[in-house]
Image: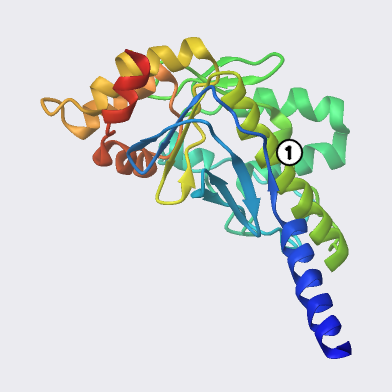
Amino acid sequence: MKNTKYILLIILSFTLVNISKAQKSKPINSGFVFIDGKYIEPPYVVKIIDDKLLINKQILKSIKKPINPPKRVIVDKFPGYPPDSLNQEETMSYKNPKTENFFFADVVTYYVNKYGIEEARNLFTEYYCGLPNINCIQTEPYIEVKVENYSKPIIIAWEHFYIENQNQKSKKELKEQFKKTKYFELKTISEILRNGGCVFSINKEALKSIMGTKRTSKEFITKGIPIINNNKLNDIDKLNTLKNDFGFFDLDSIMLKFIEKGIDTTYLNKRIQ
């Protein structure tokens, strides 16, 4: 009898641990979800299990566990300028060959350490927008960068480039950070759906480009999906049109996978008729 009670206690404890790991939303009847080219019907239950974010038991994305970043080399000399031979995209992702840090992070770090944060903001904005291969539209209060074949500028807060030499976190701190990240992911996706927005995923990777309201969702469903499913257009034309008309800003390689898959509208048509 004691053994039976002991076994039941173990099973109960194991069940409670598993339940505590899972976090989920209440059923959501608004919004639209597209996973691997298929429309998922509501109601939607957004759920976190371990390191996976799921909608209606289908994986939307994996959530990366936080790790301690490598200690950065802190520059004490002005890094100079990236090579003029680089195009805009290469310039924005260029790394300092002397430190292996992102180049602009080193520039900002140098300015902050020497002049303080307020002056560094002005100096970096002037420096960044003065580069010959960076097309800045506006400098206050953010840096707006015009990208080729993209109708809307990319908005960059200058602090984006300022990466502090973070102290190494303990296992407990990393665990707590991961817990907060999962809660934020669940809350964000749930809120987008409650607002009537669209959520997209391809190959277990959620697209950053989200139609966040009923209005933008309707525009995407009535105009965007026909573009994706139009066999008369090539994939590059589809990609550029989606960027211009709907503000998709994911990597081209991810977007092309999304486009190549197409979208099955069978069940979607029944809902919007």
Q: Quadrant of the N terminus?
A: bottom right
Q: Amino acid at mark 1?
A: Val
The residue most toward the front is 1
Residue 224: give x, y in percent of width and height. Answer: 32, 20
Describe residue 67's horizontal placement relative to residue 3 as left or right: left
Between 61 and 148, which is closer to the camera in this rendering? 61
- Tell me if mark 1 has few (under 14), some (14-19) or many (20+) residues whose alpha carbon lies within 10 angstroms of its own: many
Which quadrant would residue 254 be assigned to in this image?
Answer: top left
Judging by the rendered image, the residue that carries numbered circle 1 is 108
Can residue 149 be seen here? The reply is: no
**Horizontal arrangement in the rendering, residue 216 relative to residue 18 (left or right):** left
Residue at 76%, 22% in the rendered image:
122
Which of the two residues, 211 or 42, is positioned nearer the viewer here?
42
Whole-percent x, y for residue 51 in the image: 63, 58
Q: How is the image coloured?
A: rainbow
Looking at this view, is 264 or 9 the one in front? 9
Instruction: Depth check: give the residue in front, 118 or 171.
Output: 171
* For residue 225, above or below residue 103: above
Q: Is residue 5 left or right of residue 214?
A: right
| Residue ID at (24%, 20%) | 226
Residue 76 position, x and y percent, is 80, 51
The quarter of the picture where residue 144 lies is: top right
Q: Position of residue 170 (x, y in %)?
A: 87, 66
Task: Tell me the residue at 15%/26% (across/down).
Answer: 233
Which quadrant would the C terminus be assigned to in this image?
top left
